[in-house]
Image (cartoon, rainbow, N blue to C red):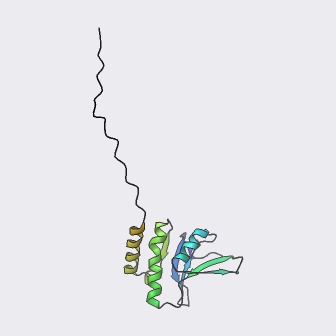
Amino acid sequence: MGNRADDYGTDVEIYVKALTTTIHAATPTGAPAKLHGLLEQLGLERHEYPVGAPLYVWHTVPDHLGAEEQKRLASRAIPPLLMAGYKVNIDPDLFDETAYQQAAREVRANRPRPARRQPPPAASSSRPTPSRLTP
């Protein structure tokens, strides 16, 4: 039995679970621990079944947040996930453009910049003496 991420070939599918108001973040079966850890760092709550030896792992946006704050949290999670190389899809009804743009600016500002390339060493000021050909 798969989930949305398995079905759509993505790393994270963010959607409202049918017949609920809960925002889920589904990951593919066997997703790496690194992905689960990143989702938790971004504020999503981890769930597993059965507990202790999970067969299924999923994440949700915390219930105690208001509906608009839940959407902002879900949208703010996208840029860090994309920068980490994950393929993410979010239900358009959940997407908050302003929160996404703010998170994208923060990710870009915190991204390590490549080291500046050192200029090549300056050429020696003394010119080599041309060799002389003797007959």
Q: Nearer the viewer, residue 116 or 34?
A: 116
Q: Quadrant of residue 40?
A: bottom right
Query: With 61 as the anchor, is 96 left or right in this view?
Result: left
- Identified at 42% across, 70% down, the residue is 107
Seen at 38% across and 68% down, the residue is 109
Q: Is residue 66 above or below residue 15?
A: below
Does residue 124 appear in this view? Answer: yes
Could you say where residue 66 lies in the image, as x and y percent from the top left? 47, 91
Q: Is residue 59 left or right of residue 88?
A: right
Task: Please report the residue visible at 37 percent of the width from the left and 54 percent of the height from the top.
Answer: 116
Q: Position of residue 53 (x, y in %)?
A: 72, 76
Asked whether the viewer can see residue 7, the reply is no
Q: How many marks?
A: 0
What x and y, as percent, mark residue 43?
Answer: 52, 80
Question: Dividing the image into 4 quarters, which one contains the C terminus?
Answer: top left
Q: Quadrant of residue 76?
A: bottom left
Q: Is residue 55 left or right of residue 6?
A: right
Rendering coords of residue 112 (x, y %): 43, 62
Q: Residue furthest top?
A: 135
